[in-house]
Image (cartoon, rainbow, N blue to C red):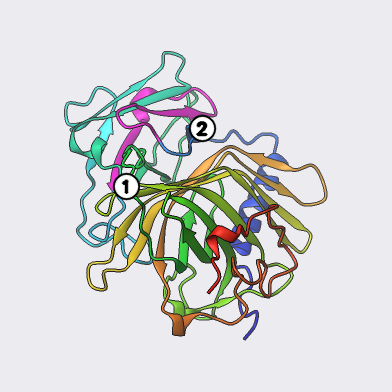
């Protein structure tokens, strides 16, 4: 049972890579435009500022159509599937459309950039991750048209709160799941130990988890997940600051890099940031985190020239794990930083500061 599914995202990554290589080898293929949601340096979008879209080539402005969804339990299931009957917060917004409520969409004259200004209450929902959907049918000037929708998770800055009161947080282990759609489909499932000081400084250790056979690849049920202790497993180490009072807390990490080796394949996520809101579970009253994980670039190395993709982001949820659901061998800030995952574990110097692990 140690490695039933050591890296559940590998088949999706290699399939996408194979498709891209095939397309590069077909010189007559003229692909449709590829949209990108530009990522701010902080990893989250300043509240009130428009979202910036870019395209791989000039588009027909009349073919651009978007929707925006709040990523909440009313809209998406715990497996990240759309709830039946859910309605978007912004529905089928097009350039110059009178029906584009709570937003305005414009395209630059050269057709290579677009701006989406979100207005009204949705723009103030900094504690809720959002999902931008670009509908199929996006065309270039030659009429080449996308046949699938593109999705981009984003968030307005949840850390505008400057409360200087002591920060409280339920230190312990949390299970994080993030499903990246662009630029490559990747599912991240991580066990995480998070510890926070009263001044808001935090340390965060994440370690790769595997999904047991027969369960959804984006499950968040700890009974369906085990620690990945193979050579393909990896760890991440994040530092940052949590701020706000008991009602509105948020966190923002410093940027860090993640290296994932899967046999001959290397995946490098550069400039990774964690931004999120700390909420209370309604039933248990325990802390949980909802936010976005972003990266400045994603590089695939397969032994030849690397493939470098632009920035991306995805919403994540991190739920507390009951003590009886914790697997053996997890990394720990106060005992062993790598646990049973030494193959890809390189903690930063002075990461396990004594102030996070007082005696006793």
Q: Eyeballing the image, is 71 above or below 152?
A: below
Q: Eyeballing the image, is 307 above or below 334?
A: above
Q: For this rendering, which residue is in front, 139 or 218? A: 218
Report the side of 34 relative to 18 (left or right).
Answer: left
Label 2 environment density (alpha carbons within 10 Å; few <14, some 14–19, many ≥20): few
Q: What element carries label 1?
A: loop
- The answer to if 86 sits in the magenta stretch is no
Q: For this rendering, which residue is in front, 95 or 165? A: 165
Residue 258 percent coordinates (x, y): 64, 52
Residue 360 percent coordinates (x, y): 53, 74
Alpha carbon of mark 2 to alpha carbon of mark 1: how far? 27 Å
* Residue at the spot of label 2: 41
- Please tell me which residue is depicted at 22% across the width and 59% down the height of the picture: 74
* Residue at the spot of label 1: 165
Label 1 environment density (alpha carbons within 10 Å; few <14, some 14–19, many ≥20): few
Report the side of 90 relative to 332 (left or right).
Answer: left
Tell which circle, 2 or 1, labels the residue nearer the N-terminal end. 2
- Please tell me which residue is depicted at 75% across the width and 67% down the height of the picture: 343
Q: For this rendering, which residue is in front, 11 or 280? A: 280
Q: Is mark 2 on a helix, strand or loop?
A: loop
Say whether residue 347 is visible.
yes
Residue 338 percent coordinates (x, y): 67, 68
Say whether residue 223 is visible.
no
Q: For this rendering, which residue is in front, 94 or 90? A: 90
Task: Tell me the magenta residue range.
Answer: 45-69
In this view, the residue farthest toward the right is: 303
The quadrant where residue 170 appears: bottom left
- The answer to if 47 sits in the magenta stretch is yes
Report the side of 98 relative to 349 (left or right).
Answer: left
| Contact (Cβ within 8 Å) of mark 2 with mark 1 | no
Residue 65 percent coordinates (x, y): 32, 34
Q: Eyeballing the image, is 115 above or below 6?
A: above
């Amino acid at each position: 049972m140690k490695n039933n599914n050591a890296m559940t995202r590998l088949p999706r990554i290699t399939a996408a890579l194979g498709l891209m290589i095939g397309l590069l080898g077909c010189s007559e293929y003229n692909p449709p435009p590829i949209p990108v949601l530009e990522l701010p340096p902080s990893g989250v979008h300043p509240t009130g500022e428009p979202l910036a879209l870019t395209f791989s080539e000039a588009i027909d402005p009349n073919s651009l159509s978007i929707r925006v969804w709040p990523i909440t339990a009313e809209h998406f299931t715990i497996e990240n599937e759309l709830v039946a009957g859910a309605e978007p917060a912004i529905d089928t917004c097009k350039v110059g459309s009178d029906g584009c409520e709570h937003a305005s969409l414009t395209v630059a004259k050269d057709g290579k950039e677009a701006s989406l200004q979100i207005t009204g209450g949705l723009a103030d929902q900094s504690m809720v991750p959002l999902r931008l959907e670009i509908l199929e049918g996006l065309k270039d000037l030659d009429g080449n048209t996308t046949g699938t929708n593109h999705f981009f998770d984003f968030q307005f800055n949840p850390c505008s709160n400057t409360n200087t009161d002591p920060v409280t947080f339920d230190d312990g282990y949390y299970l994080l799941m993030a499903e990246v759609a662009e630029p490559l489909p990747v599912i991240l499932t991580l066990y995480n130990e998070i510890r926070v000081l009263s001044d808001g400084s935090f340390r965060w250790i994440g370690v790769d988890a595997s999904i047991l056979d027969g369960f959804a690849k984006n499950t968040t049920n700890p009974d369906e997940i085990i620690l990945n202790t193979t050579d393909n497993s990896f760890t991440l180490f994040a530092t940052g600051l949590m701020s706000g009072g008991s009602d509105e807390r948020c966190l923002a990490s410093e940027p860090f890099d993640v290296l994932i080796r899967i046999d001959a394949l290397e995946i490098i996520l550069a400039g990774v940031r964690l931004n999120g809101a700390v909420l209370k579970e309604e039933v248990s009253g325990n802390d949980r985190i909802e936010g976005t994980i972003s990266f400045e670039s994603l590089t695939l190395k397969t032994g030849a020239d690397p493939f470098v993709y632009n920035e991306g982001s995805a919403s994540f949820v991190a739920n507390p794990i009951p003590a009886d659901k914790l697997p053996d061998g997890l990394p720990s800030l106060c005992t062993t930083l790598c646990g049973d995952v030494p193959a890809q574990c390189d903690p930063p110097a002075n990461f396990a500061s004594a102030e996070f692990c007082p005696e006793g």
